Image (tube, rainbow, N blue to C red):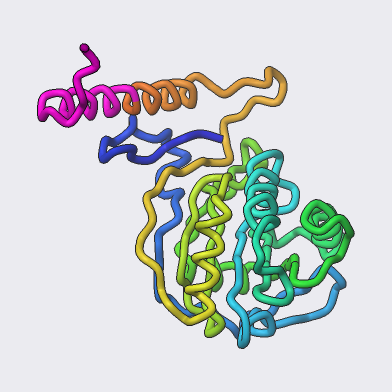
Amino acid sequence: MLLASSIFGADLPKLPPQLQGITIEQHLGAQLPLDAQFEDENGQTVTLGSFFGEKPVVLALVYYRCPMLCSRIMTGAVLGLRPLNLKAGRDYNVVAISINPSETPAEAAQKRDEYTRNYSGRAGSPGWHFLVGSPESIKAVTEAAGFHYRWDPATQMYFHASAIMMATPEGKMSRYFYGVEYEPKDLELGLMESSRNKIGSPADRILLFCSHYDPTTGKYTVAVMNILRASAVLIMIAMGAGFWWLTRSGSVPDARI
């Protein structure tokens, strides 16, 4: 997992070659392929469109064997959605789609039980759907959503970035929330606007990537740490520049008596 994006308009160091092209583009207004077929956590064949029509959808493109980042994404979604007055199943649906075509409905069911238990206190609460599918169906959805990822044979992992997305009841992409922590108030506003088929504005991107974590040491690799350090330095520079500008412009009150 690593931070690799622009912060306050400044570009971070160049990504490693294996992460080039791994991103999540904001395809706001793009139509999802509602006729794409998947299997749900019960092994039943469903179309993506069966979760649309009346409610907006929170969409998570993950995979169930992901060693770290995907669980952070889903936990972040649970923590962001749980406090809302809007409730899954009644006001919106949550649809997680595995980008790994080898994963099974049994794995989807295990994840559904895990996250719905965290959401409502009981496994299998309504409105949460975990799907698996063919490479063709997965590709149709990821391309429509702007989700670019790659399988890495060396690590046996999918390299991907982190976000949850929203789509309108008509199946059009309406919101993107990057990272692994999502503010409840932002999610509630996004759901309310999406329910009215309103397309949101582009969001700032700070991307986390699923890669380069060494489980044997519990540490990030040197390349990742350099990028993390660089991002911290950029934040400090931006804060310092902002304070200097405020001081020079006289916007900061004089604390002297």
- The residue lying furthest to the left in this view is 249
Q: Position of residue 130 (x, y in %)?
A: 75, 65
Q: Position of residue 14 (x, y in %)?
A: 34, 33
The quadrant in which residue 132 appears is bottom right
The quadrant in which residue 42 appears is bottom right
Near-viewer residue (249 or 158)? 249
Q: Position of residue 57 (x, y in %)?
A: 60, 72
- Note whether residue 204 is visible: yes
Along the horizontal axis of the image, is 239 left or right of 212? Answer: left
> The N terminus lies in which quarter of the figure?
top right
Q: Name the residue located 65 percent from the left edge and 79 percent from the top edge.
A: 48
Q: Is residue 136 above or below residue 72?
A: below
Near-viewer residue (105 or 186)? 186
- Note whether residue 136 is visible: no
Query: Is most of the magenta stretch helix, strand or loop?
Result: helix
Q: Is residue 52 above or below residue 111?
A: below
Near-viewer residue (254 or 84)? 254
> The C terminus lies in which quarter of the figure?
top left
Along the horizontal axis of the image, is 142 left or right of 94? Answer: left
> Was residue 211 drawn as part of the magenta stretch in this picture?
no
Q: Name the residue located 45 percent from the left edge and 55 percent from the top edge.
A: 24
Q: Is residue 4 above or below residue 73?
A: above
For the record, the magenta segment spans: 236-257
Q: Is residue 86 above or below residue 45?
A: above
Q: Position of residue 36 (x, y in %)?
A: 62, 80
